[in-house]
Image (cartoon, rainbow, N blue to C red):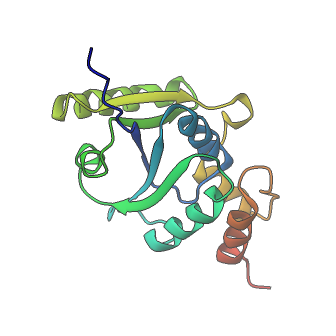
Amino acid sequence: MKEPVSRSRVALYPGSFDPITLGHIDILERATGIFDRVVVSVLRNPEKQPLFSVEERVELIREATRPLDGDVEVDAFDGLTVEHAKQVGAIAIVRGLRAVSDFESEFQMALMNRRLDPDIHTVFLMTSAPNVFMSSALVKEVCRLGGDISEFVPPAIAEALRRRVARPG
């Protein structure tokens, strides 16, 4: 009997991550428990006006994910997510869901990706209950209005956000 060939299970976790939140980290922590390696990829989207540049987001994610167990890599990409998944050797694309409202668009995207490459699967992970309401946009707004964001983002991200949106005195 032939020995099974050991294959590394790689997942791609794509997003804008402007900025990465504890909700994203929650999904990433669980993904590292399922996959051998997770590549967190920042999407270069010229149609969005991000607070942080792609390069800044990559560095902030590297800082925020440093304490995680598991094999996490961080990069950036443009173009089709499924093509980038192939480039990094991913067998799956990880997507986080907060509420039913996320599901419809994520479901459509998963079906399109499946049509583009049936060998790459989409894995949906539900966020933990404390993170259900959280989004990068909401965290940025709370910070802009002077609210405490320490419960929503890692410390390095909170500091970067405060510096970026600080109101002149």
Name the quarter where the C terminus is drawn. bottom right
Please say if 13 is above or below 92. below
Residue 89, position as x, y percentages in the image: 30, 45
Q: Name the side, left or right, on which 123 lies relative to 134.
A: left
Q: Name the side, left or right, on which 149 lies relative to 85.
A: right
Is residue 51 shown to the viewer in this render? no
Residue 129, position as x, y percentages in the image: 71, 28
Q: Which residue appears farthest toward the front when viewing the image?
A: 1
Name the quarter where the N terminus is drawn. top left
Residue 47, position as x, y percentages in the image: 33, 61
Where, by quadrant of the figure, is residue 10 drawn? Answer: top left
Residue 5, position as x, y percentages in the image: 30, 30
Please say if 138 is above or below 155. above
Please say if 3 is above or below 130. above
- Image point (47%, 56%), residue name: 73
- Image point (46%, 45%), residue name: 37
Is residue 94 shown to the viewer in this render? yes
Q: Name the side, left or right, on which 91 lies relative to 131.
A: left
Where, by quadrant of the figure, is residue 90 drawn? Answer: top left
Q: Name the side, left or right, on which 152 lies relative to 91.
A: right
23 vs 83, nearest the viewer: 83
48 vs 59, nearest the viewer: 59
Please say if 83 is above or below 128. below
